[in-house]
Structures are given as C-alpha cells and as structure tokens.
Image: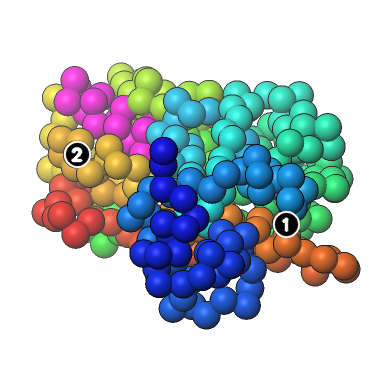
C-alpha cells in the first residue's frame, strides 16, 4: 500500500486538513506550510486519490496538455516540465498529440473533449489569429506558443523576436557577418508564427549593424522539417550552391543539430569556419559535438506559469478576470559552436 495523506501530514508536521488544502491549492495556506507539505509529498512520492477527490469536488485532478508532436525535442521536454510542475501541485497530466493538424487542434479545445479534464494547456501550430474565437470554451484553457495573440484566454509565450535578435547579436559580437538563417521563408511573412517572429529578430539585428539582408542566406523549411534532416538538407544545398557564409542561426536546436552534421560532412570546421547558433536549449544541444550555443527561452518557467495560471482559472468563481499574457525572461547560452567553453553551469 502506498503512502497516505496521514503519512504526508505526519512527515510535514501538519493536520490532514492542511494537507488537503495544499493538494487542492486553497489560497489561504502559509507559504512555509505549503512548502513543507509539498516537500513531504515529494519525499514520500504520494499520489492523491484523484477519483475520490473528483467525487467530492466535481473535479478529476487531471489537466490536459495538447502539443503538436512529441517527437520534437522541445515539445517532449515541455511536456516533461509541465508534468513535473503539475505533480508538485498534486495534479495529473493527460498529454495529447495533435500532429499539427487543424482538425485535431479544433477537437482538442472543443467543449466535448475537456469535460474529463479540469483544464487544458494548448499549443497550436495550424490554428492562427483568425481562429481566436475557437478558444472561447467553457473549460479553463491556457494558450501556449505564438499562433494566436489577444485571444480570450491567458497566454504564456516566449520572447521570440528579441531572443532571436540577441542570438544574432551574439554571432555579430564574435565577428561574423555572413550569417545564414535556417527555418523561415523571407517571402512568406504574413502569418504570425515562431519562424516569422524569429526571422524578424534576425532582420532587426543585421539592419541595426548596417548589414543588408541577403535572400540567399535565408533558407526556409516547412514546420514538418524543423528537425535534424531539415537543417542538414538546407545547409548542404546552400554549400552546393556556392553561397558564402561564416555563421548559421538555426531557428530551433534540432535544425541546428542537423547543421552541425552537415558541416562535418562538408568538411567545414565549427566554429573556426562557421559558427552555429540554435534556439530553445534542448538537453541534446549541451551534449552535441561541439556543444551548441543556443537561446534558453525559460521552458521550465513557461510550464510552471502555465500550470499556475490554469489552476487559478480552475479555482475561479464568479466573474472571470480579463486574460493576461506572460513572457518569461530568456538568456543566451554560449557554448563551443560559437567559440566558448561549455560548462556544467549551462
């Protein structure tokens, strides 16, 4: 038999009622007491009885997370961060993969789907600004990503444009001037997306330095090719076309890993001949050879904020507060691919 609420109360030195209040995220619990209870829950690996809780409160104790693809490192690691953040708050997580398909994304937020969940965290890629009305649902919902802005829900996103600008500025700071970008289309900038926001940051950084944008250096890949294969293919093609470049800014780390592979196959040294910069700071970027410089977008903080906002919406009674947008801070992580030593402190 696993640990019980009585066990948690004993280890934390509080009453069973206090443990229940913490698990159900009641607001009137002292921070120190809440911390002791959460530490006891983690130490004992206690799992609340979600079925019993649901019968008493009308809630399941489970939230949903809908993401495009768990094969993409970023979304797999985001799911891990969300699950860990939810567990600390006594919640389970049901993860759904939409495969980036419009109909699947619409089903994920339809009123019939979330009824078995207390709320949903939703990261779309096919829905866009014109679909903001689809987010008006009865169930608590928090939006992730960059496809829909100023919608009817809380929105947790990242500093795509300014973070991309900082990434290119990092390459400029080490003397690179022919900076290629992989993952966006210079001629298709009408939609709001991660790719186009990061492309805009690239353009701003180069323009501020007085460097003219060279279309030959901007290489598109479809969103389904934001992976190692897409990064490698775009790099090989650029080299075979005779395009000169001394740096590559890949719009996510998996594209960047493909760039590193292509550089090796083409006999180009990194960072001596070509510096490489990624985006997202997935775990693998730290252990590539060479280790890859990247942008840490605050994935764990994004997950924590999103779970907290969803819990607040779940607990909301009466008139709803207006939706809010949150953007955690980012940082540049300089590693071997741009000429810096990689450290464990990354």
Which quadrant does the C terminus fall into? bottom left
Q: Say whether disc 1 or disc 2 marks the residue closer to the N-terminus.
A: 2
Query: Which residue occupies 87% across, 67% down?
Result: 318
- Residue range in magenta is 246-266
Q: Residues within 10 Å of mark 1 (few under 14, many from 20)?
A: some
In the image: residue 190, left or right of residue 224: right
Q: Position of residue 324 (x, y in %)?
A: 70, 65
Q: Which residue is mark 1?
A: 314
Q: Which is more toward the observer, 226 or 118?
A: 118
Q: Which residue is mark 2?
A: 287
| Vertical placement of residue 85 versus 34, above or below | above
Task: Label 2: state its secondary structure.
Answer: helix
Q: Position of residue 14 (x, y in %)?
A: 46, 72
- Please say whether residue 116 is one of the residues in the magenta stretch: no
Q: Main secondary structure of the magenta part?
A: helix
Query: Which residue occupies 72% across, 57% down?
Result: 314
Q: Which is more toward the observer, 330 or 305?
A: 305
Q: Residues within 10 Å of mark 2 (few under 14, many from 20)?
A: few
Figure colour scheme? rainbow
Q: Position of residue 10 (x, y in %)?
A: 40, 65
Where residue 171 sits, quadrant-wise, is bottom left
Query: Which residue occupies 19% across, 59% down?
Result: 345
């Amino acid at each position: 038999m696993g640990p019980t609420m009585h066990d948690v109360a004993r280890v934390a030195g509080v009453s069973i009622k206090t443990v229940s209040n913490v698990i159900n995220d009641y607001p009137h619990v002292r921070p120190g007491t809440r911390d002791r209870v959460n530490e006891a829950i983690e130490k004992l690996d206690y799992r609340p009885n979600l079925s019993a809780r649901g019968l008493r409160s009308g809630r399941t104790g489970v939230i949903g997370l809908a993401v495009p693809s768990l094969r993409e490192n970023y979304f797999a690691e985001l799911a891990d961060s969300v699950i860990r953040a939810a567990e600390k708050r006594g919640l389970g997580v049901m993860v759904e993969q939409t495969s980036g398909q419009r109909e699947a994304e619409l089903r994920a937020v339809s009123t019939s789907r979330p009824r078995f969940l207390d709320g949903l965290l939703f990261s779309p890629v096919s829905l866009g600004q014109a679909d903001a009305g689809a987010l008006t649902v009865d169930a608590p919902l928090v939006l992730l990503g960059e496809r829909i802005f100023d919608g009817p829900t809380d929105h947790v996103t990242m500093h795509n444009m300014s973070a991309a600008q900082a990434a290119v500025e990092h390459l400029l700071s080490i003397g690179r001037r022919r900076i290629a970008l992989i993952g966006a289309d210079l001629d298709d900038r009408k939609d709001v997306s991660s790719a186009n926001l990061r492309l805009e940051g690239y353009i701003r950084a180069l323009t501020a330095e007085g460097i003219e944008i060279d279309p030959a250096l901007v290489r598109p890949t479809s969103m389904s090719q934001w992976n190692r294969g897409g990064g490698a293919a775009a790099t090989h093609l650029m080299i075979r076309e005779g395009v000169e470049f001394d740096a590559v800014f890949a719009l996510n780390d998996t594209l960047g890993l493909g760039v590193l592979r292509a550089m090796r196959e083409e006999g180009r040294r990194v960072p001596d001949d070509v510096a490489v910069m990624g985006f997202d700071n997935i775990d693998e970027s730290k252990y590539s050879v060479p280790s890859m410089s990247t942008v840490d977008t605050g994935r764990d903080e994004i997950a924590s904020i999103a779970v907290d906002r969803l819990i607040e919406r779940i607990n909301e009674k009466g008139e709803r507060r207006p939706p809010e947008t949150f953007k955690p801070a980012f940082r540049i992580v300089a590693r071997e691919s741009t000429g810096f030593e990689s450290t464990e402190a990354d």
